[in-house]
Amino acid sequence: MEETYKSWPSLIRSVTSLTIPTIDADRYDTLVITGVGGSGIVGDFIHNYTYELDSLLHIVSLKDLQVPKPLLGRKTLVVAVSYSGNTTETLNAVRKFLDSGSRVIGVTSGGLLKQVLGRDNTVEIPIGYQPRAAFPLLLGAVLKFLIDNNILEAESRMLETIAGKMEDLKMETLSYAARLGDEISLHNRGPIILACRKYYPLALRMRQELSENSKLVSIAEELPDAAHNLIVGYTLSREERSLVTIDPGERYCSALLSIYEDVTGYAPIRVELKGDNIVEKTIWGSWLAGLASVHASKKRGFNPEDIEPIKQYRLMLKSLINEKR
């Protein structure tokens, strides 16, 4: 798995050659990106990219097997993200959308999702990776679909540019990730991961990586909201948790983090993001989080590929869904 994380620049570059379905975006008013886990976080990232990128459609991230009624219908375009193509929650949501007349595009390596939607409605990505390590394929494929169909206003060569910058930063990133993994693994409890709202999906992504790879239960929080609740428990309880702050180097976000750090009195592990825009910063930050989490898993004596509880949950959920049909 570590080698897959190291190959992220080439994985992102490979997305540029994918075959992308063409749609008439003017027919829709809402874009729903649906999925769960490492696939579902894609929708959160895309939604928050609209802090900097214009979008033709209103974007909703849905991470559930149920669908709110206002999202159903012919005016909704859906991008269903599932690396395996067999995610129960995503397939259940997709069926509801299809029944309502929504157009659904799948981003997957195959499975039932491809069978349900067909080749013309599928962006097929390479098979054979651990789903969470395949994140750049999932996010990159969705970005390419949205850019190529003029839903997101971004440079057509954005992914190629990002891949090149990541290659230039590879050795520095590997070293940075090892140091971060060392610091995180010093505690038996996972860190509190803090980001401003704009970068909150990256905090969630780091929490996911530390849970699955490092077997650390972490907390992801956002500012300014956390300064109105979490700050009290964290400061007065003096829990033995480290504080990881995600600093994008932007005046507003960096100022909020500094205030939080000053009030709590904790010395944070500050992650300074690299990149010139939110897309570059969040992809690089996700790369760093993945590499650091694998490094921490080794320090803690865990196998990052051991996800037995997730397998048990999936089997039980599938049985429950089948019983209700």
Image: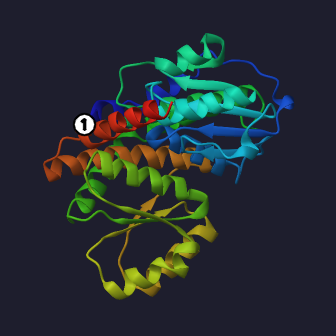
Confirm whether residue 77 shows in the render.
Answer: yes
Number of numbered discs present? 1
Indicate the colouring scheme. rainbow
Q: Which residue is tagged 1?
A: 305
Residue 313 is situated, as x and y percent measured from the top left of the image, at: 33, 41
| Near-viewer residue (27 or 292) | 27
Relative height, residue 254 to residue 309 (above, below) = below
| Residue under the point 30% across and 59% down | 217
Q: Residue furthest left?
A: 301
| Near-viewer residue (39 or 76) | 76
| Residue under the point 36% across and 44% down | 290
Q: Residue furthest right?
A: 26
Confirm whether residue 160 shows in the render.
Answer: no
Residue 133 left/right relative to 300: right
Label 1 crowd (10 A; few <14 / some 14-19 / many >=20) = few
Identify which amino acid the numbered label 1 is placed on: Glu
Residue 124 is situated, as x and y percent measured from the top left of the image, at: 54, 18
Residue 147 is situated, as x and y percent measured from the top left of the image, at: 71, 31
Q: Where the N terminus falls, by quadrant?
A: top left
| Residue under the point 50% across and 51% down | 274
| Residue under the point 54% across and 60% down | 248
The secondary element bearing badge 1 is classed as loop
Which quadrant holds residue 305?
A: top left
Residue 185 is situated, as x and y percent measured from the top left of the image, at: 22, 59
| Near-viewer residue (98 or 198) | 98
Residue 242 left/right relative to 263: left
Which quadrant holds residue 265?
A: bottom left
